[in-house]
Amino acid sequence: MDNVKILDKEFSIYLTEEQILKEVKRVATEINKDYKDENPIFMGILNGSFMFASDLYKDITLDSQITFLKLASYEGTSTTGKIKRLIGINEDIKDKTVIIIEDIVDTGNTLDSIIKQLRGYEPKEIKLVTLLYKPEAYTKDFTIDYKCFDIPNDFIVGYGLDYDGYGRNLRHIYKIIE
Ligand code: 5GP
Ligand code: MG
């Protein structure tokens, strides 16, 4: 498959749409099995997870809801660094099982911030499903419950993930050529 150029950078194919959808189906099947007696609420984190959330949710057969959240730009600072505020929670998630849908977990800082804020709404439990996970970069200890792919520390784009806002429309996932 051809390389793609986005802005000033060149990328080569890393995971094809076919490979992606196969893993998405595998993970959805696991979730369907694990929550067969429950009605979890899925929460996609925008923007990056929109394509993954869409494909994953088509394979979910549970009686369930999906909603989308966004991390708003910096809302002041704390001693531990910048905190992004999680916006868009309109549902009552108290005592419900929440399944976060992420595109990629890198250092885990974003996930950490999302989980800390969601805990304030007192859900029964918070689980995570991520398309991509970079084990070498991860610094947190929250369990990655479901993941499609472990990937090395390379910058990737496509299938919802961007480079400077571009490349989200690519149906395959591409890796930067250094
Ligand atoms: P973390 O907070 O776990 O370090 O990073 C998570 C966020 O960084 C992701 O939600 C994503 O926006 C961005 N990110 C991390 N690695 C990559 C990557 O390889 N490609 C793209 N496009 N975004 C990434
Ligand atoms: Mg993200």
Image (cartoon, rainbow, N blue to C red):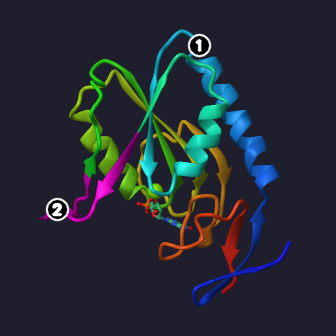
Residue at which label 2 appears: 75
* Dot label at residue 82: none
Question: Callout 2: helix, strand or loop?
Answer: loop
- Which of the 4 image quadrants contains residue 142? top left
Q: Is residue 157 magenta?
A: no
Residue situated in front as seen by the camera: 131 or 43: 43
Residue 48: percent from the left, percent from the top? 50, 57
Q: Is residue 22 left or right of residue 92?
A: right
Question: On the rendered image, what quadrant is the N terminus found in?
Answer: bottom right
Magenta-colored span: 68-85
Using the numbered discs, state the Cα–Cα distance from disc 1 to disc 2 in whole angstroms. 39 Å
Q: Nearer the viewer, residue 81 or 62?
A: 62
Residue 36's label in the rendered image is 1
> Could you tell me residue 83's position as x and y percent?
22, 59
Image location (x, y in percent) of residue 89 = 28, 37
Q: What residue is drawn where x is 59% and y is 34%?
A: 57
Which structural element holds mark 1?
loop
Residue at 70% from the left image edge and 69% from the top image edge: 174
At x 59%, y 73%, the residue is 155
Mark 1: which amino acid? Lys
Q: Where 151 sits versus 128, above or below?
A: below
Proximity of marks 1 and 2: CB atoms separated by less than 8 Å: no
Q: Amino acid at mark 2?
A: Glu
Residue positioned most to the top: 37
Which of the marked residues, 1 or 2, is nearer the chain's N terminus? Answer: 1
